[in-house]
């Protein structure tokens, strides 16, 4: 029996919209205001979504349960698989000490605090965002900056500001892959669109970062180094996202940016060396800043060994992202399982689609071609090179599973919630309501992505929750769905610096406990200002020549 979606079940669009928003509100309030753990908030949102779908939208209960189950499977593979395997690799490098060598190698390049920020907070942080995401870059860069003598507020706040431009392609493209997977976007098209929005901000953010730290004068004293850092990140970010795919965007751009800055410093140095490690006139904890720490020198072989796991990772992920290789692996093993009781049994209805259209629900167990499998193999190869025994490798892997168990559960519940809202039609109701903002929708749709990340702490979660809404609203307004899907992710990255999860990670990494309010107050202006700029930029892409030429 085919069930047809209804987008105004109460025959009152205002009431229907309010009820459709309840699952999202339950989860966001739980996370943002009640300080619930992420998996509990996601679980509460999922329960609310099931209640609304069954009792308000009259979706058959068994069908609603199967939709949630289908989303949960998607959360485990490919999304959760990526998270598990990349953190497994990170654990291996920490345990054998190569990560500390990596930290020391970055610390000894320049004594100028501003350039240290460019190298560590922006470029190196982007590398970890691309490789691991999920709070890792803020934890790593804030800890390194504290070790270099930065004050806690400077280390925390500046790491958060720097961790913006790369977030949309974080964790090997997980946010955009999830956006496409859950809401039916073409992966390459929406990836390319994000790659036409973020490069401008990849140039802007390094300038913004140094201005926030050292003021306008301090920024202008090193503008050549800032420009080199930003451009050498933005250009690869555009090229990789538009012509290769989302997985390696941040890793390649970050490596190019780091190498370019280091090489540039061989032919250029600032006339004045900035030695202060506190924020300009705003740092409440300037007295806590330490003098620069002695730099530990390592041999060339030790440095090569420290970087080797991440180079191996890049090679494996690049190979796994090649379409011919992926197709070959799928030919070996990729069984497809139509979801009984769900596949082709739901119809989307006008005005969302021109005519009733059945929704497919086929789960493909493409374990061999999954990006996480490539990461796992790279981790195993790296572990053997680092002289881990097979028993130690297996032990570390199971320790990692235990370490990320709540993260995996949260991903499963988030994907279950997002998939259920898609199949029940509640996200479509929200999309139709937001379409009423008319010509201003490109701006406010971008801010919706910002709000989603600010409250959930994840660009991936924001894309799951609001990606369908963006698509529906864009189609209703005659805008490009890819533009607004990309805007949800690109706008969302500006909310990353004010989400509770990131702020707690920063305060923990810097051992600046119970000062989360100070960090939030410092970064809030930067977050909302950059989000509004992104909204204006998306509006130009939607309506104004020549920006409109970038929209596919």
Image (cartoon, grey):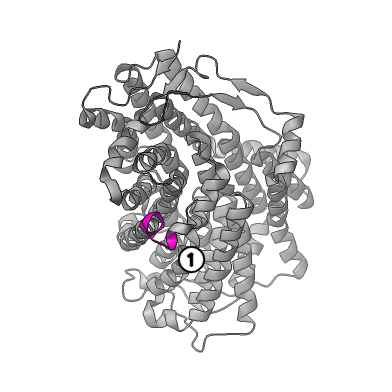
Does the segment drawn in magenta span residue 543? yes
**Front-most of 455 and 319?**
319
Q: Residue at x 53, y 73 (%)?
A: 116
Query: Would you say residue 8 sits in the magenta stretch?
Result: no
**Which residue is more in the foreground, 174 or 393?**
174
Position of 75 relative to 186 (above/below): above
State the count of labels: 1
Rendering coords of residue 297 (x, y %): 68, 73
Percent coordinates x, y for residue 441 in the rendering: 31, 48
What is the span of residues highlighted in magenta in the rendered image?
539-547
Q: Residues within 10 Å of mark 1 (few under 14, many from 20)?
A: many
Tell me residue 209's x, y (percent): 43, 69
**In this rendering, does residue 26 appear at all?**
yes
Predominant SS of the magenta segment: helix
Q: Which residue is mark 1?
A: 146
Looking at the rendering, in which quadrant would you find the N terminus? Answer: top left
Residue drawn where x is 53% and y is 36% of the image: 181
The residue lying toward the viewer, choosing from 109 and 259, is: 259
Q: Secondary structure at mark 1?
A: helix
Residue at image location 73% in from the left, 28% down from the top: 333
């Amino acid at each position: 029996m085919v069930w047809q979606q209804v987008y105004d079940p109460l025959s009152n669009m205002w009431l229907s919209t309010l009820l459709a928003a309840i699952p999202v509100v339950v989860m966001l309030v739980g996370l943002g205001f009640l300080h619930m753990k992420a998996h509990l908030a996601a679980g509460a949102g999922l329960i609310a979504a099931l209640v609304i779908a069954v009792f308000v939208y009259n979706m058959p209960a068994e069908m609603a349960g199967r939709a949630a189950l289908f989303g949960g499977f998607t959360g485990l593979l490919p999304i959760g698989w990526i998270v598990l395997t990349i953190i497994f690799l990170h654990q291996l490098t920490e345990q054998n000490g190569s990560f500390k060598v990596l930290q020391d190698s970055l610390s000894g390049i320049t004594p100028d605090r501003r350039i240290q920020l460019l190298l560590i907070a922006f470029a190196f942080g982007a590398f970890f965002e691309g490789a691991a995401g999920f709070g890792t870059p803020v934890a790593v860069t804030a800890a390194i900056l504290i070790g270099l003598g930065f004050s806690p507020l400077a280390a925390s706040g500046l790491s958060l500001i720097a961790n913006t431009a790369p977030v949309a392609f974080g964790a090997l493209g997980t946010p955009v892959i999830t956006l496409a997977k859950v809401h039916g976007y073409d992966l390459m098209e929406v990836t390319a669109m994000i790659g036409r929005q973020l490069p401008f901000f990849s140039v802007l953010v390094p300038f913004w970062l140094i201005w926030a730290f050292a003021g306008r004068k301090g920024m202008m004293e090193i503008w050549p180094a800032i420009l080199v850092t930003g451009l050498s990140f933005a250009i690869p970010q555009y090229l990789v996202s538009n012509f290769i795919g989302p997985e390696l965007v941040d890793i390649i751009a970050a490596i190019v940016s780091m190498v370019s800055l280091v090489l540039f410093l061989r032919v250029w140095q600032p006339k004045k060396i900035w030695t202060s490690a506190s924020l300009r006139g705003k740092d409440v904890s300037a007295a806590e800043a330490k003098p620069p720490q002695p730099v530990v020198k390592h041999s060339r072989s030790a440095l090569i060994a420290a970087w080797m796991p991440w180079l191996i990772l890049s090679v494996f992920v690049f190979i796994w992202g090649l379409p011919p290789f992926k197709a070959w692996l799928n030919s070996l093993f990729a069984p497809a399982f139509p979801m009984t009781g769900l596949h082709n049994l739901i119809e989307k209805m006008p005005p969302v689609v021109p005519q009733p259209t059945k929704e497919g629900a086929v789960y493909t167990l493409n374990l061999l071609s999954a990006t996480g499998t490539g990461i796992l193999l790279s981790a195993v190869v790296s572990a053997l090179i680092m002289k881990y025994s097979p028993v130690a490798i297996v032990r570390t892997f199971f320790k990692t599973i235990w370490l990320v168990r709540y993260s995996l559960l949260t991903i499963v519940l988030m994907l279950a919630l997002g998939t259920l809202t898609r199949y029940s039609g509640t996200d479509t109701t929200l999309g139709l309501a937001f379409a009423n903002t008319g010509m201003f929708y490109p701006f406010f749709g971008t801010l919706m992505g910002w709000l989603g990340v600010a409250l959930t702490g994840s660009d991936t979660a924001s894309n799951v929750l609001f990606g369908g809404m963006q698509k529906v609203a864009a189609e209703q307004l005659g805008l490009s769905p890819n533009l607004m899907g990309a805007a949800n992710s690109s706008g969302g990255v500006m909310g990353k610096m004010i989400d509770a999860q990131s702020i707690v990670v920063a305060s923990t990494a810097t051992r600046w406990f119970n000062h989360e309010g100070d960090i939030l107050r410092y970064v809030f202006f930067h977050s909302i200002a950059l989000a509004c700029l992104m909204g204006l930029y998306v509006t130009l892409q939607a309506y104004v020549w020549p920006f409109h030429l970038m929209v596919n």
